[in-house]
């Protein structure tokens, strides 16, 4: 699942691509989600200890532009466990080679 804030270029947005292929679905901002949320507001990195929650309740990503994070209403997201990813380097065309600036597809695949 994902919260889509429509800030990305539609041609390059991996979150929208995953949704078109039926691999991820968009959800309204205030819809509750009790699984793991990959978020820049996380306080801990996702770990093997989160495997049970991932298996039972799933994974969600926040589809937004890294340059416009200040516009995201994180307080309105009714969600479970916010997690950071461990140190990873992006290979997407927009943020290639930048540490921790992954696309939705890269972030979801990392889990």
Image: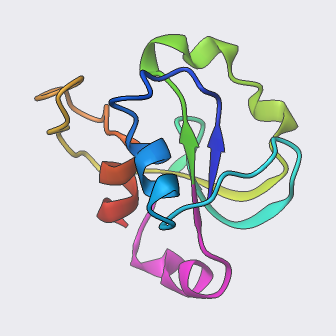
Residue, x 54% and y 62% (percent of image)? Answer: 24
10 part of magenta stretch: no
Pick whichever, 1 or 19, lies toward us.
19
Apparent side of residue 96 relative to residue 63 in the rendered image (left or right): left
Residue 3 horizontal side relative to residue 84, left or right: right
Question: x%, y% of residue 54?
Answer: 55, 78
* Along the line of sight, the residue nearer the viewer: 23 or 56: 23
Q: Is residue 45 visible?
A: no
Q: Residue at x 47, y 23 (%)?
A: 8
1 or 78, which lies in front?
1
Q: How is the image coloured?
A: rainbow
Q: Quadrant of residue 21?
A: bottom left
> Who's the residue at 35% across and 52% down the image?
105
Please say if 76 is above or below 50: above
Can you say whether 71 is above or below 10 in the image? above
Magenta range = 46-60
Q: 7 above or below 57?
A: above
Residue 66 falls in which quadrant of the image?
top left
Q: Inspect the magenta stretch and tell me whether residue 48 lies in it.
A: yes
User: In the rendered image of this protein, does residue 20 appear above or below residue 30?
Assistant: below
């Amino acid at each position: 699942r994902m919260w889509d804030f429509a800030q990305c270029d539609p041609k390059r947005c991996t979150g929208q691509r995953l949704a078109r292929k039926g691999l991820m679905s968009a959800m309204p901002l205030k819809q509750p989600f009790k699984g793991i949320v990959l978020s820049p507001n996380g306080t801990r990195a996702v770990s093997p200890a989160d495997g049970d929650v991932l298996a039972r309740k799933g994974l969600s990503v926040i589809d937004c532009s890294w340059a416009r994070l200040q516009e995201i209403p994180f307080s309105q997201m009714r969600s479970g466990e916010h997690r950071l990813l461990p140190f990873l380097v992006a290979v997407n065309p927009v943020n290639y080679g930048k540490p921790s600036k992954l696309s939705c597809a890269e972030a979801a695949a990392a889990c």
